[in-house]
Amino acid sequence: MIYRIARVSSLLAVMAGMSGCRQSGAVPERTASADPEPVVSVTVAPVVRTTLHGYVTGWGRVEPESATAGQPPANAAIAAPVAGIVADIHCTEGERVPKGATLFQLDGRVADVAVQRAQEAVRYAESVVQRQEQLGPGQATSQKAYQDSKQQLAAAQSELNAAQVQRRLLDVPAPIDGTVVRINTKLGNAIDPSTVLAEMIDLNRLVVNAAVRSVDVGQVRRGQRVTLTAGTAPRAPSDATEAATSSNRTSTPTETATVEYLGSQVDPATDTVLVRARLPATSTLRPGQYVTVRVLIDERPNQLAVPVDSIVQGANGPEVALVQGDVAVRTPVTTGLTEGGLIQVEGNSVREGTSVVVQGAYGLLPKARIKVIGR
């Protein structure tokens, strides 16, 4: 019994010693190592010096010029002044014809007979007058007979003039210098004065009637240069950002024109104002074509610019991440005009040729280690 008690006491003493070692820190703890600084992969672009332009954007359609002082409208609907049957067509679609050229002829057989009869009546009346003059008024013939012959001659001449006018009405001339853009009749068709035989447009006198947002039209002035790009009918930009984006799109070849008229009323349905630009005579645009309109309102040469995607919004405004070796430092900037994917910037340390972060700029710390992709 004494032996068993001594053995248990020894075991308890050993266990107590081991517990004391753990409580006194005899076993060393593992130390945590610091996390390495992250490296962000980015693409960069240089700060460039260029000329930037400011535009007001609108949309419109190419149309013939309206009538002005001393000039008729640049388009015309061709109709005959009398009823008849189309006997001849002297024009083709796409042909440019001068003012006064005969475009259509109506059947003139009846009118020709009337002219011939009137001419015969005039000749007979002239012979009667000559006979009366040979006899001598008041001598071999009476004064009254002589006067009656003169009146008959005048009446016959009047009938001839009327018949000739009716005959000329059967020849339909071009009312303006222009191009025949559409022929609406065929040989043998019976027509009346309400029938439009053809349509003409003077393609050297075209304008663009454009719609510009009322908030932007205050920056537009007569004489400003306009860039016109053909395309489908656009819609009004919903905000300034979308307007800038749409103004930088490129598609079909462009034309240049000049602002010549500003409307004085706002269209309440679209909140736009009419702006009219005159096309040059050499323009390749055609009537009815929809165009995007960009009015040049500002031009700033020798400006520093960076890609639009390099601009991030910081706590106090726009910033760019300037590249300094393998570190990018976010720097406040002032922005200006936007054109062609570039935006005007000014700020400390922003110099021509300096690199800025483009892809990967968002989410960067104020000062971050970077790895440039593609370098």
Image (cartoon, helix red, strand yellow):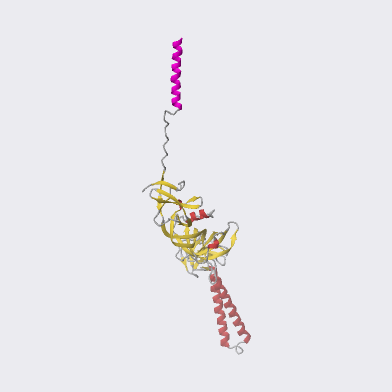
- 203 is within the stretch colored magenta: no
Majority secondary structure in the magenta region: helix
**Left or right of 317 in this view: 370:** left
Q: Is residue 251 in view from this perspective?
A: no
Q: Nearer the viewer, residue 20 or 364?
A: 20
Q: x and y percent of residue 251 in the render? A: 45, 55
Q: Nearer the viewer, residue 88 or 281?
A: 281
Residue lying farthest left? 375
**Left or right of 352 in this view: 211:** right
Q: x and y percent of residue 322 in the render? A: 42, 52
Residue 3 occupies quadrant: top left
Residue lying farthest bottom? 139
Q: Residue at x 43, y 46 (%)?
A: 368
Residue 352 occupies quadrant: bottom left
- Tell me which segment is drawn in magenta: 1-23
Q: Nearer the viewer, residue 154 or 294?
A: 294
Q: x and y percent of residue 288 in the render? A: 51, 59
- 20 is within the stretch colored magenta: yes
Q: Nearer the viewer, residue 314 or 172?
A: 314
